[in-house]
Amino acid sequence: MKRIAIVGVGVTGISVLKEMAAHDYYQNFEIVLFNEPRTLGTGVPYQDDSELLLINQTADTMSLEEEDKYDFVKWVQVNKDSTAGNKDFIPRKWYGEYLKEKLKSAVAILNPTIIQENVEVIRVLKDGTYHIESATTQGEFDKVHLCTGQLPYQDPYHLKDHPHFVYHPYPVEEKLSHFPEGSRIGVIGTGLTSIDLMRFLRNQNKNLTLGFFARNAHFSLYRGLEYDKDLKFLTLENLEKEKQMHGGFVTFSKILEWFHLECQDKGIDFQDLTYRFGKGSKEQLNHLLEENTDLGVLQGIIHKLDFYLADLMAALTQEDRELFYTDYEPLFRHFRTPMPKESLERLMDAWNTGEIQVWENMEAVEMLEERFKVKLEDEEVEVDYLINATGQNQILTNSELPTDLLRQLINERILQPETFGGVQVLWPGAEAISPRYGVLNNLYVHGQLVIGLQYGNNAHLLMKQARKVVRHDLTK
């Protein structure tokens, strides 16, 4: 019997298995799942942790059921005795419980072997199959789905080895509950992770002093009421027509033209929104909470793009992709990745009353024996502990590879790092491109590892792409 390995059983791995369970073809395979016990069935983002941590997507975008976008909402209402609605923000922990139920259903259909260990080695054999090793097992497989999840966290100030530095803050209940009463806590970064940390730490009742440090102290916006309007210009049809006329490529200037036409069509003054809210400064965020804006309309356009952002990226030349990442990506990400409104209200209430401090122009950190001295442009601030909220390092280098497996795959030239993040794959089939073996037809790469093409991966995109990859596999 032929064998399939699914390496990593979080959102993507479960989505792959669930799609396989929908096709009789996969009843003829022995399927083996690999994942360490703690995050089996949830992945890191949705593991058992504090209910204060919220999903940054609305509940109606998180269903694993392709034909029922409200399946997760219904699950919450039934299983949590909750009145949560389609546009509410749900605890991540609850979503992990939902994922485990979906995994259980797929397991009942396909009866896979579950090995509660991480894979340490994958090698390509002469006959085109794959040799896989974990701590206590090894075997050969005909197909492999690589769903290993998050990329390594950044450590821009090289603090990882200091005992008072929290390099990876999740699960927060384990990593952030040990601070002594009255500790001075600094958070490096002002992205969405920092909001998680604020929600948790301010609930600790330990009289903690909390501050945020960043080069530019700009926070995300909140997610407005998105208007569900069809796009007229930024469409797959227009993309395909343009590609046919220009040798398979589309200029970034043309995509930018379509974007501005969409804004005009929906009555949005994009330049004005950028001027008023494009930095996420304290002043701008206070104004945002006080005003009625058409920000939700802009976010609605951007959300619609999620379904084919990867197709747009794949249609750009290398030069145009560099232009996007250099000149436009930070602003696009700022508008695309908002937080729940309640989280922003909590942040601004604490910031305005001086209960938290926010420092910008961060330049360096001096490590002392049991504390840190954070050096800003014009002053120095001492803290007892620093927590890393700088986010993932999308660019894979040998010095920062997060796992033994990824290190082995890169070092042995089985996978090739992609310039803009993750590794190289054929799109949309997601077959790995190896500098040593060429296209690896039955090694499929998913999730954060393809972020260089599948820009802005979130759970919704991961599920959608996993289904596409399995259906593509069926056609071979």
Image (tube, grey):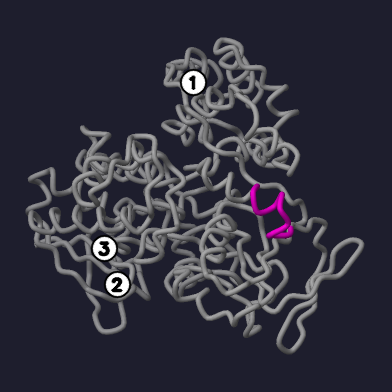
- Mark 3, secondary structure of its residue: loop
- Mark 2 = which residue? 132
Q: Position of residue 337 (x, y in %)?
A: 55, 41
Neighbour tally class for label 3: few under 14, some 14-19, many 20 plus, Cα within 10 Å: some
Neighbour tally class for label 2: few under 14, some 14-19, many 20 plus, Cα within 10 Å: some
What's the amino acid at mark 1?
Leu
As for residue 398 lying within the magenta part, the answer is: no
Q: Earlier in the sequence, mark 3 or mark 1?
A: 3
Q: Position of residue 441 (x, y in %)?
A: 32, 50
Neighbour tally class for label 1: few under 14, some 14-19, many 20 plus, Cα within 10 Å: many
Q: Residue at x 32, y 41 (%)?
A: 84
Q: Which mark is residue 239?
A: 1
| Quarter of the figure that contains the N terminus | bottom left
- Does 465 appear above or below 168? above
| Quarter of the figure that contains the C terminus | top left
Q: Which mark is residue 129?
A: 3
Mark pair 3, 1: CA separation? 36 Å
- Mark 2, secondary structure of its residue: strand
Q: Which quadrant would residue 333 be assigned to in this image? A: top right
Camera-side mark, 3 or 1: 1
Q: Which residues are magenta?
A: 348-357
- In the picture, measured across the screen, residue 194 lies left or right of residue 3, that is right
The residue lying toward the viewer, choosing from 25 and 186, is: 186
